[in-house]
Amino acid sequence: MTRHLPLVALLLAVSGPSHAFDGVAVDGLLPDADFFRAATCGAAPGQDCLHPPLRWPRPTLTLAILPSEAEAGLLDRMLLSASVDYALAQINAAGSGLTITRIAGPKADIRLSLTDAREDGQIAEVPGLSGAGLMGVGYATLWYTPDHQITEAAILISTAITPGEIVSVVLEEIFQTTGPLFDIEGAAYEGVSILSQSSNATVTIAGQDARLLHHLYPPEP
């Protein structure tokens, strides 16, 4: 069962955070169009969107792991680094028009760091690092413009995460910073989608998840 919270999105680059997004409850596997709407705007089948869909305005992004004072051993940091590299390889291999490259330094579009915060612990708003909210084992924040273009993103990974969770959680958090804000709540998606709210069994971007990336970022003809 997953223990990380969905994304917290910020209304503007200079504003405070909005509500945390819960999973969209579904019965069975959805058609692609319904899955895309559920993941990007929180719409259950036949219902209205809860939040405007977000996307990056450019096809190439950068990601960096920032230094932190979190109490993590060398092995944990190495596992985090390997999980990030694996996640980027999965996303880039999905064949969409979006590519994320890992770099060093704080100027990356997506910034990821370790935190000693534990699940259900309160996270303070820190510009460039996180919006305020409740921590899970993973916690992501997006900043975006009034026309719903993402400008930057940040991810916190708790040092309380277990080795069995980290690959899936890191992949999901990075995947969600591309725009799919909402988890999918339903047994049919457990072990099938990286967006499953109740499972950390998925460690690949395939099927509807890959098609969702294509929907958000169509590949060049």
Image (cartoon, rainbow, N blue to C red):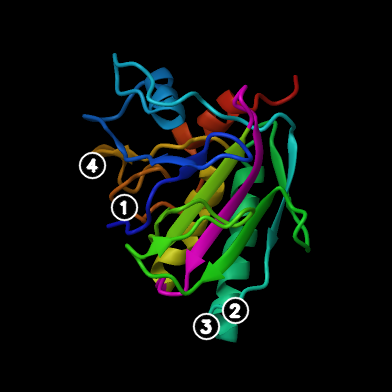
Q: Which residue is mark 3?
A: 71
Is 160 colored magenta in this rendering?
Answer: yes
Kindly identify the amino acid type of the residue bearing the numbered disc 4. Ala
CB of mark 2 within 8 Å of CB of mark 3?
Answer: yes
Q: Residue at x 51, y 58 (%)?
A: 170
Q: Quadrant of the C terminus?
A: top right
Q: Which residue is mark 2?
A: 69
Which marked residue is nearer to the observer: mark 4 or mark 3? 3
Residue 15 in percent (x, y) is at 56, 39
Kindly identify the amino acid type of the residue bearing the numbered disc 1. Ser
Which marked residue is nearer to the observer: mark 2 or mark 4? 2
The residues tagged by marks 2 and 4 sit, at their Cα atoms, a distance apart of: 38 Å
Residues in magenta, as a range: 145-162
Return the disc, 4 or 1, that comes first in the chain's sequence.
Answer: 4
Return the disc, 2 or 4, that comes first in the chain's sequence.
Answer: 2
Classify residue 78 as left or right of residue 33: right
Q: Residue at x 69, y 36 (%)?
A: 98
**SS of the residue under disc 4:** helix
CB of mark 1 within 8 Å of CB of mark 3?
Answer: no
Residue 183 in percent (x, y) is at 37, 40
Residue 160 in percent (x, y) is at 40, 74
**SS of the residue under disc 1:** loop
Classify residue 2 as left or right of residue 75: left
